[in-house]
Image (cartoon, coloured by chain):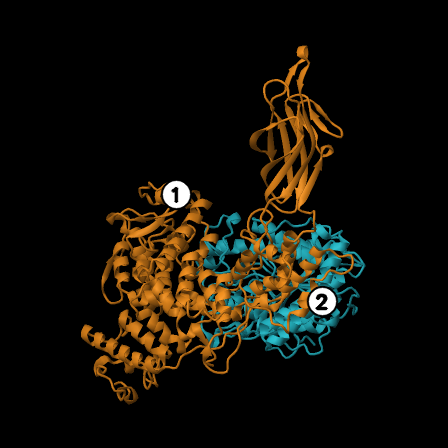
Amino acid sequence: MFPVCIATLALALTPPEESGCLECHDRESAKGRIVLEGAAFSQHSLWRRAEEQLRAGLMPPTSEPPLGDEARKRLIEWIGEGRRKAFATAAPHAPNAPVRRLNRSEYEACLEQLFGSGLFQGPGALPRLPADDLMAGFDTIGSSLGVNPLWTRLHLEICRSLLERELPEPGQGTILLAAASFQVVEGLGQVETEASLWTNGRLAANFSTPSGGAWKLRLFASCNEVGQGPGRLRCWINGKAGETFDCDASGKGRDIEVDLRPGENRVELEFLNDFYEPARKLDRNFQLARVEFRNAQAPSLAAGLLQQEGGLKSFARLAWRRQPAESEWPPFAALAVPAPGESRAAALRRAAFAVLAAPAFVFRIESRSAGLRPLPEVELASRLSFFLSGAAPDEILLASAEAGRLRRDLKSHFDRLVDGSDSLGRRSAGLGFGFHLLEEWQPQGDFAAVWKPSLRLAARRQAELVLTDMIRRDRPARELVDASWTWLDRELAQHYRLPWSGGDGFRRVELPTSELRRGGLLGTLAFAAVTSRPRRSSPVLRGSAVLGDFLARPPPPAPPDAGSLAESGPAAQGNARERLAAHRSKASCASCHRSIDPLGFALEELDPLGRFRPAGSEDFSGHLPDGRRIVGLRQLQQILAAEEFQLRRALALKFFILALGREPEDADEALLDRLSRSKSGVRGMLWELVNSDAFQKHGSD
Amino acid sequence: MLDRRQTIVGLAALAGAALPGRASYVSEAPLRILYVYQPNGVVGAHWHHPVPAGPLGRLPASLAPLQDLTSQFSLIRGLQQKAAFAGPDGAGDHAREVGCFLTGVRLDKTGLQAGISVDQRLAALPSMRAPVPSLELGLEPGRAAGTCDSGYSCAYSNNLSWSSPTRPAGKECDPRNAFRRLFGEPARLADEAGRRLQAEQLEAVTPLARRQAGELGRSDGLDAYLASLEECRTETRAATAGQSLPMPKIPIPDGIPPDPREHLRQFYRILAEAFRLDRTRVATLMLGNGGSNRVHHWLGHGEGHHTLSHHQRDPAKLAQLAEIDRWHIEEFAAFLQSLAVIKEGSASLLDNCAVIFASCINDGDRHDHADLPLILAGGAGGRLRPGRCLSFPGQSLNALHSLLLAWAGEAQPAHGDAAAPLNWS
């Protein structure tokens, strides 16, 4: 019987007394530590789980008398009604945000906003901070983002090298190579005050540069103007040939654009058309006076700002995501004044270093409110920007917030950020769905030869593009599992054995009806791989991933002695299905595995590399806990697509943690329920989240 | 099971001084302490289970690489870490195996709260003071799968060392960074001016950061940042104090090597040099994060360590696990050997070290945290007489930590559930 205190809530529906829930979940038995007796609907998580268990057919357990379809439906409605009433009266939950350090990806994005992209990749890259400890699967939760001397040392070193590179001493951006630096490496010639070639051949010199990228080579050289036309030269950088060009007798400087790498480089000048007619005393030689290299890169946003009068403060405003306060600014400004004998660049470097070492750069710091109030707009700008684009607010956003127009123009900023960056799609695919694990997944045996680095990157990119597209085009959550489209490039199309006529790069394709299994995320290489062991696919990993990442109902962790399916040896007798069946015969295992296994069996249609196993090669069938039979991926997609609420909830949970940097608490259930229940697409869900009290306000604690 | 008599023999033997016929001697050289941690437990049948208390004889298969070094280490049996057992917290033994190993306290499953780890307590003692207060190394960076372990923050399974109850000390996975921290920036080793400039910048920055943080009010994160800025400043000051840094006799590492074997060897080389040159006196080395699923492909394995560790007594899996155990011991033995050949006065560097190699899980399939596999190598500066198997059934691992604290001069060596050091009198 249901408790009086619940029954007395004025409800249109009453719980069927025969449901029997309280046989086990009364205060006394408290089976599974779940007590429904006397539980008010304001215990949001408790009743949500009860509702989920009923929906999934997991309760009552098989050992108890079954609940009829009609009774089940009425019970679910009764709980839903009660929960919605409790939500309607729930107070807004928007606690003050604790101070939290930028995580690694935010940190790198902030520096790249200021100093240009690609700082942390490729030759000459800056060192990277240690990876962040994840909490609840994400790197946005403040309490897991610690600081220790190791972190700080690297942070300071990154800033120091960056500023040395960006604010060099005057003249450091130019490298001069005198003729004497060259050697004749091919042909005949000599090196004195000028370097000369008398036959076709090459002059070469090694030199080093502080930074790589675009440089301008200025050549001071001449060729005797004899014979037909001018001399022809070719410039080689690091063994790579450039265009050929003419060289006349004037000796005037000539500019050539070259691409240098940081550190050691080699330049070679090749003389291509020696001409010699002793009879007419015609001799064309090549004479080199000197070579200069000038850094041709446009200054970064930060370097540009810092060069201006008073630019340090503008730089600090962007770095700190707010205007420096009058009270705190003077000592920073003082650092930019050169000491006697010190260069202006050195003083600027010191001051800019102090700005980046200041807590206002390293930490996301929000003001605290003693009661529920709207967040100041400048702080809202940071929340919005870090959530939607993974980086600090840009000039447009910051200026709008400083002028107090951010809330008024919120929709246009929202649209600009959602359409302007794929960061949210990337982070959702990475940590949200666990595809960051592709980095370390190493298949073995026959699979290893197929698993090329380019295929791994393409797999990750496909998932990122699917999610980005779902956000941008406001697709319904069900397309996570069942869509008529996907994103492919040539390599993936070939891998999936799909026709390709799209040229290079990724593009969205409509799938033929026979290939709908490839729509959504389940039929992707990325999903198939991260849910596989090195030598086999794993129905258990796959079933668990569907429950946790897609349906927001993660199974509890396996007990320590649960074991795993063997690769080989005596324990590997029988196929995975038979061994799992044996496993399910243990009562302690059955309660979870009857949900996990049927999903995993349907997904066995995919091998570890996301290729379809031929129909009939294995048994892809299973029975869901509610008794429905399910065969293969396509049926699974259709069954999951009907779980719109849970799919939305799974997405809402991920977005919540990315947006607010905390795990949802009981008091956040009202918001999560609203996000999961609404009929909008994914973009609409984000918009709702951004407009919620949890996002817009603070101080409810 | 080991009987009481053996226990008493073991307790007596741990303190060499307490045995007749051996003069009490404590080296004047500094004590150096290292904890090497192997995740996921071991196959006890080839590791510590068959070894009887008393002098070490023929070693089981996984420990066989140490056979030539039996006079240099003790095998310590029977210790347990109670805080790591599930208790009311349920699943999550791999978060706890690492998080509890050196802290000795129960972990907060919903938030982030452990305790100060023994290595960090050691590093704070005057006798252990060195230019780099402590070194935390690991082979696997801090990222991990999903929630890491059953709802625990990944910070637990990724960090042995905790500088405060809420703050892991972090760990360095890049040998180049570890080298740089110990011996200076390679490119700037000779560049006195560069170092001075660095120091000046830090001198200017630290008070500004402190002042700004002061206006923002207190928070754990800000405090930790300010403390670490201060530490960087102290280190840089020391580096510019005039005397040039000692030159290590190892090549400058070039980032994280792609081969994990080379990665580990580089760390062992760095540790040996750090101890030899007295750059640091306390270090931890994590061979993997808790529940590490590294695939030891060089042993021909196709499954990860954690997957294999749930072996369910499958002989094929047990054999592969024993191979992993043995490989770790091979590398460890080579490291001990490298310490043993370095002379320090009339003794060796190893004689002045206490090197612990252990896991905080006994059997990876059962996740039990009792009768932990544990080697204590070195002479601890004359405080130890190695060469035996000692047994302390049911006693706390924290009592061993406490013993190290007492050796290092801690007046209140209680740690975790151990009120006093392992007692042998």
Which residue is denoted by mark 1 in the rendering?
Answer: A491
User: Taking A438 as reference, is B236 above or below it?
Assistant: below
Name the amino acid type tagged 2.
Leu
Q: Residues within 10 Å of mark 1 (few under 14, many from 20)?
A: some
Instruction: Spot the cyan chain and give its letter.
Output: B
- Tell me what hue chain A is rendered in: orange
Which chain is home to disc 1? A
Which chain is home to disc 2? B
Q: Where is residue B116 in the image (x, y as percent from the top left)?
A: 61, 73
Instruction: Give the SS element for disc 1.
Output: helix
Which residue sits at x=43%, y=57%?
A420
Residue A472 or residue B348, whichever sits in front: A472
Q: Quadrant of residue A473?
A: bottom left
Instruction: Give the SS element for disc 2.
Output: loop
Q: Which numbered disc covers residue B384?
A: 2
Is residue A642 in view? yes
Left or right of residue A540, residue A148 in this image: right
Name the amino acid type tagged 1.
Glu
CA distance separating discs 2 and 1? 63 Å
